[in-house]
Image (cartoon, rainbow, N blue to C red):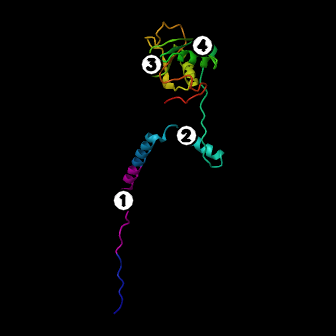
């Protein structure tokens, strides 16, 4: 008996029927994963990966934690601004103590009065002084979310003297323990 060799039948390769469809599906999946990661906190800053890579390169590949913040933008020198500090905290002396701390930062034209009760400390600005208010809030360690235009109804109990800025000290702010002269990054 002789060995007979049978020819094998060839099979088509096991590839997807439509590689273009698979490519589209993979791209859509990648976009969905990217959006989920971005919303989970991976997208706080457009430059965060670049900054991290640059910092790691400067440190020989080691990651470091350095925090930098932009200096507060200010259009008017602090000594030239009229500032009124109102006590809305319900605790006696907080407007005066806040005024004294701000005077140490160069805000020398300050008056302190009684304010309407408030749980949160706010910095109000009159027209054209929004950058000044943001700078003052940052110097008090407050975020940009605490800066607002002066409302139609005064936040102060006494008639408001003319002022570029009004600081309404709330129950959340203790000037005796607050760190003045610090800056915080702006809120998104």
Give the mark nearer the N terminus: 3 vs 4. 4
> How far, Cα to Cα, is label 1 from label 4?
71 Å
In the image shown, does 98 or 49 lie closer to the viewer? 98
Up/down of 181 relative to 42, above or below: above
* Residue at mark 4: 81
Q: Which residue is mark 2?
A: 48
Provide residue 168's location: percent of width, then percent of height: 50, 17
The quarter of the rendered structure image containing the N terminus is bottom left
Mark 1 and mark 2 lie on one chain; the one further toward the N terminus is 1
Between marks 3 and 4 in the image, the one whose residue lies nearer the viewer: 3
In terms of secondary structure, where does tag 4 sit?
A: loop
Which stretch appears magenta?
Answer: 9-26
Marked residue nearer the N-terminal end (2 or 4): 2
Mark 3–mark 1 CB contact (< 8 Å) = no
Instruction: Give the percent coordinates (x, y) of residue 116.
Output: 45, 14
Q: Secondary structure at mark 1?
A: loop
- Residue identified by numbered label 1: 16
CB of mark 3 within 8 Å of CB of mark 4?
no
Which secondary structure lies at badge 3? loop
Residue plotted at (52% across, 38% down)? 46
Q: Nearer the viewer, mark 1 or mark 2?
A: 2
Of residues 44 and 86, which is closer to you in this image? Answer: 86
Place of residue 160 in the rendered image (x, y in percent of width and height, measured from the top left): 50, 8
Residue at the spot of label 3: 118
């Amino acid at each position: 008996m002789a060995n007979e060799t049978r020819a094998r039948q060839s099979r088509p390769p096991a590839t997807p029927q439509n590689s273009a469809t698979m490519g589209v599906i993979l791209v859509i999946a990648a976009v969905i994963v990217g959006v989920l990661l971005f919303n989970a906190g991976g997208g706080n800053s457009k430059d965060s990966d670049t900054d991290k890579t640059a910092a790691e390169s400067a440190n020989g590949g080691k990651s470091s934690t350095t925090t930098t913040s932009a200096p507060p933008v200010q259009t008017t020198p602090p000594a030239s601004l009229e500032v009124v500090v109102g006590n809305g905290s319900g605790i006696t002396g907080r407007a005066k103590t806040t005024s004294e701390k701000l005077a140490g930062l160069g805000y020398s034209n300050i008056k302190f009065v009684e304010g309407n009760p408030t749980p949160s400390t706010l910095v109000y600005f009159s027209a054209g002084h929004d950058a000044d208010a943001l700078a003052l809030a940052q110097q008090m360690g407050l975020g940009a979310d605490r800066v607002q235009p002066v409302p139609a109804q005064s936040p102060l109990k006494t008639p408001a003297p003319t002022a570029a800025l009004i600081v309404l000290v709330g129950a959340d702010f203790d000037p005796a323990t607050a760190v003045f002269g610090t800056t915080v990054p702006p809120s998104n």
